[in-house]
Amino acid sequence: MIKSLRVRNEIKKKADYIIKRLKKEGIIVQRYDCFTTNSIYLKLDYGVINTIRISVYPGKKHLSSRYNLL
């Protein structure tokens, strides 16, 4: 459980950093935290610039996340 919390916190830090940098460039970011898989999805400019997925495991091929940070 402690490892899971550490992993979740590390993913949140990375997402916060990316969001801060993108907003500085004027990009609108929508964030979705998936607690069952410890993944965070960042939809950029309402999906026009695709999606960034931050997770500790590879994503499913049928999903449309353009960028995966593992």
Image: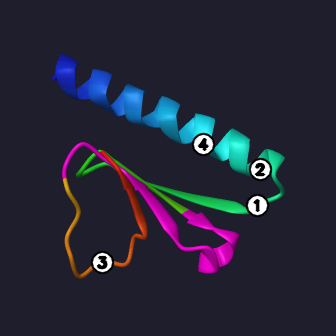
Label ID, residue 63: 3
Q: Which residues are magenta?
A: 43-57
Q: Along the line of sight, which residue is nearer the eye, 69 or 47?
A: 69
Residues at marks 3 and 2, CA–CA distance in whole angstroms: 25 Å
Label total for image:
4
Q: Give the CA separation, mark 1 to mark 2.
A: 5 Å
Q: Is residue 61 above or below residue 42?
A: below
Relative to 65, residue 55 above or below = above
Residue 61, located in which quarter of the rendered image? bottom left
* Vertical arrangement, residue 40 with respect to residue 47, above or below: above
Q: Residues within 10 Å of mark 2 (few under 14, many from 20)?
A: few
Q: Which residue is mark 1?
A: 27
The amino acid type found where label 4 is placed reads: Ile
Residue at the outermost left position: 1
**Residue 53, image x and y in percent?**
40, 57
Q: For residue 18, which numbered disc appears in the image?
A: 4
Picture coordinates of residue 49, whole percent (x, y): 62, 74
Indicate the amino acid at tag 1: Ile
From the viewer's perspective, tell me whether residue 51 is left or right of residue 4: right
Magenta-span inclusion, residue 53: yes
Q: How far apart are the two marked residues, 3 and 1, measured between alpha carbons?
A: 22 Å
Residue at image x 59%, y 37%?
16
Q: Quadrant of the N terminus?
A: top left
Q: In the figure, 62 relative to 38: above or below? A: below
| Left or right of 49 on screen, residue 52 | left
